[in-house]
Image (cartoon, grey):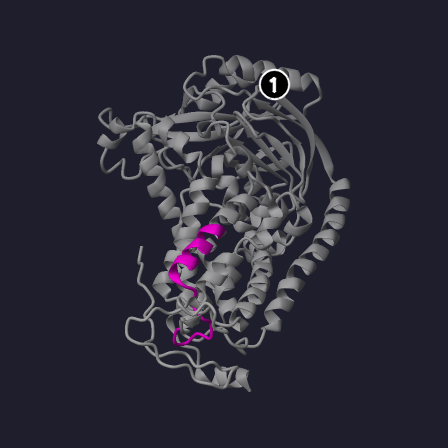
Amino acid sequence: MTTAHQQESEAAVADAGGGETASLPLPGAPRSAGDLPARAGSAARALPARLAYALAALSGLFYFLGFPGMDLWPISFFGLVPLIVALRGQTPGRAALLGWIAGFVMTMTGFYWLLEMLRVFSGFPTILCALFMAILCGYQAGRIALCGWLYGRAEARGWPGSVAFALAFVTSELVFPLLFPWYYGASVHNAPVMGQVADLGGPYLVGLVLVAANLAIAELVTHRLDRAPPSPAPGEAGRDAGPPRRGRPLNRAVVAVGIAAPALAAVYGVLRIRAVDAAAAAAEPIKIGIVQPNLALFDRRNALKIHVSRTRELAQQGAELVVWSEAGVPQAFRESAYQREVQRSLTGRLGVPTVVGTVIHRLPADRNERGVSFNTALMAGKDGEILGRYDKQYLLAFGEYLPFGELVPYLYKLSPNSGRFSPGTSLAPLEWDGHRLATMICYEDILPHFVNKLVAQGDPDLLVNLTNDAWFGDSTEPWIHLALAKMRSIEHRRYLVRATNSGVSAIVDPVGRVVAHSDTFKEQSLLGEARFMRAQTVYGTVKDIPWYVAAAASAAMALFTRPKRWRLRREA
């Protein structure tokens, strides 16, 4: 990571409020933190490096505490303030480093469960897995480093700091590629009233509402810091520091937006929840059964027995549709005959329509070549006939494939527990009894752009997710996964049914509330009510186009100096 340090001026800064000019310091004489100059192009005075680094780390800790898993969600309204304060007046290189520090602290604490996942699937020693985890978290921290760099560049070119940070933040969430995606807006998943704007702009808009509150608090803090008198230099402890500096005026527009944005989002949330609840009450209901088998990762001998018995029990209890977890039945069926084989050996004895998670294998044309396997969801009718198929498209690195594994097959010998799957290509929904089920497997349900495509192509009336989070252990990860997935219900105003191997299985309503959920790492059956719904939302229509425009604006601010006439107009 670039760690370029800010150059300091040799001249002392004049005290604007006192009317007297401070004397020039002698070469090598120590200077107080308050004497650090503002960087060219910025009205802000940069904090000393050590203090800035500490504040960035504090923001990383706050991010972790306010995020799903810890769920101290009110922290999300001020958790970014230390980072924003630390970034002001810094060089782009140091701003990137500050963002990276915040991101690294957040990911190392919030994604601690990566260690177990790497240990289980790689088979490597724990020490080596810890190193890989640090490297992975270091990479994922690059998202916030990008935010810091874009902000630093824009501020240096004279653009308003608050606008620059907001655009940089949404840009980093939109474009930075992650192995395990997350969004700041998910912090308020347990406060549904704050998350309803997701149907207008997805998780990015929810996050921007929180960013607005952070920017307002940061504006108050930095305004206070700018007015504080300089700290006395060493050896001058008894000397009067002088009157407060006049500093820059308070940006009341930033404060006003920071107050208005959450307030308006809350009002919108109240109104939308009432309207969506009324629409849901008039929609067609259906009793959903979920089988959570709690199977060990590498011992699934009882998988078929558990699924069949649990499904029959749910059917007797009134379930009209049953959903199994990802690859609930580990048997691989031949692609050339899977419909017949699955019905004969599995679904023909269930007696209830079921979404089945399994594996389909395509034999190679040449015996010397490797076949192709798919992580698949099948729609079975009441008599067990196979009505539809969906193959997972977004495969999980290290779990379902190894990066560069096809180019260097020897990597699979080094990591024998990693899968070797191929991605699917069709977005068609699973159709049953006049209904359409948009199906997602594993972490596809936390990818807003992908679910946008599913909904746009299939016009489903129910969202279904099949997941296996057992490889992360009994940690916060299953709860984080659920929190991130809940946003899809709000964005498209549809019920979401999640069937997992070890939890958290759940039914989520179209305003993001959990109707029913299971425990983690327990064999359970879940029975609850969902409703078939269709709705056209703003986010579903415009998708991420506004956010790409915002990203383009952020890039332009990072590349081009703000025109002088705009600055003069604002000052006038």
Tell me the quarter of the picture where residue 312 sits. top right
- 456 vs 16: above or below: above
Task: Identify residue for label 1.
Answer: 311
Query: In the rendered view, does 11 fall on the left or right side of 197?
Result: left
Tell me the quarter of the picture where residue 369 sits. top left
Query: In the rendered view, does 293 fall on the left or right side of 407?
Result: right
- 169 vs 27: above or below: above
In the rendered image, is residue 289 in sight? yes
- Residue 335 point in image, percent of width and height: 40, 26
Magenta stretch contains residue 56: yes
| Rendered residue at 65%/68% (across/down) | 256
- Residue 98 point in image, percent of width and height: 40, 57
In the rendered image, is residue 557 in sight? no
Please give the range of residues in magenta.
39-58
- Residue 138 point in image, percent of width and height: 36, 46
Q: Nearer the viewer, residue 371 or 58?
A: 58
- Residue 147 point in image, percent of width and height: 43, 59
Outermost residue, front side: 238
Magenta stretch contains residue 265: no
